[in-house]
Amino acid sequence: MKIRFAGLAALAALSLNAQPAAGELKPDDVIKKSVEAQGGLDKLKAIKSMKSSGKMIIGGGQMEAPVVAYIKRPASNRMEISIQGQKIVEGFDGTTKWMINPLMGSKDPQKSSDEEAKTAADDADGIEGPLVNYKEKGHTVELLGKEDVDGSMAYKLKLTMRSGTVRTIFVDETSFLTIKMVSKVKQMGQEFEAEAKPGNYKPVEGVMMPFSLEMKVNKQVGMQMQFDKIEVNVPIEDTLFAMPAPEVKKVEPPKPQ
C-alpha cells in the first residue's frame, strides 16, 4: 500500500561501509522473501486499484479527521481529508500533482511544485512498493546490515531510485514486512526528514496490507492514520485523479436603477 502523504526517502547519514556478513541474506534475497511475505508477485500484480478508508489522527489525538485514499495503476493517487467541515484533496495523475485546500483560503485547485511532483512520481508504484521489480524500474538497492526498530531487528536497505531519490527501507527479519521507511522530502521550499512506520498488517485478497501508519517529520510525530477498510480492484475513473478546473464564479447582472 502506498505511503504518501505522502513521499519518503533515506536518512542522510548512512553507514556506507556496512556489508552483510558471509552466509547472510543478500539484498535480492531479502526482497524476494518480502514479496513472498506480502502474498507473492502474482497477487500483488493482480491488484489494479485500491480504496482505503479510515481516519487521520493529528496532534497526538487532539483532532481526528476522516480520510479516503485512492490508488490506481499505473501511477495515479488521490487522498481526501475532511477537517472542520472542509474537504482537503491531494491528487496526482501520473504527471501533475495538485491540491485543493479551502483551509488555506481558496477552494480552487492549486498545482504543486516540480519538486513535489517528483516526489509523487517516486511514490507512483504505491500498490506493491518500489522494491518489487526494482531493477526493471531503474532503481538500485544495497543491504546495510541490520538495525533495531522498536525492539525488532530489521534488514536495512538503501534504495536509490531512478530519479536520484534515496530511501532507507527497514524490513523485519522475522515477518519480512516493511516496518519503517525514512527519506528527505521537500515541501514549500523546505527540506524535511520524513519517517513512516506501517503496521497492523492484515490480509486483503491474499495480500498483506498495513492498516496503520505513523508519520514523523524531523523526528516529531506529525500524524497517524488508521484504516478500517481497504478494498482492491474497485472501479475508479481516471478523471478522479486529474486536476479539476477552477470553479466558475457566477457574476450577477447589475440591478436596474
Image (spheres, helix red, strand yellow):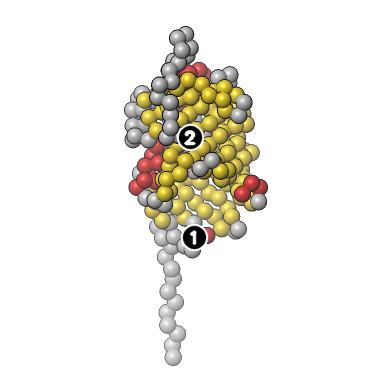
Q: Could you tell me the amino acid type at mark 2? A: Val
- Tell me if 45 is positioned left or right of 61 in this view: left
Q: Nearer the viewer, residue 144 or 65?
A: 144
Q: Residue at x 46, y 12 (%)?
A: 21
Q: Is residue 178 visible?
A: yes
The C terminus lies in quadrant = bottom left
Between label 1 and label 2, give the one nearer the viewer: 2
- Picture quadrant where residue 164 is located: top left
| Image position, residue 160 (x, y; %) | 38, 30
Q: Is residue 233 visible?
A: no
Residue 53, horizontal then vertical, whole percent:
59, 42
Q: Secondary structure at mark 2?
A: strand
Q: Residues within 10 Å of mark 2 (few under 14, many from 20)?
A: many
Which residue is rendered at x = 60% and y = 24% of the image?
A: 152
- Residue at figure coordinates x 37%, y 42% from the top left: 118
7 lies above or below 168: below
Q: Is residue 8 above or below residue 153?
A: below
Left or right: where does residue 113 sit relative to residue 3?
Answer: left
Q: Secondary structure at mark 1?
A: helix
Q: Give the labeled residue for mark 1.
A: 104
The picture places residue 197, in percent across and down from the top left corner, at 56, 34
User: How many numbered circles are shown?
Assistant: 2
User: Where is residue 55 shown, x and y percent of the image?
Assistant: 61, 45
Disc assigned to residue 182: 2
Q: Name the mark on residue 95.
A: none
Q: Amino acid at mark 1?
A: Met
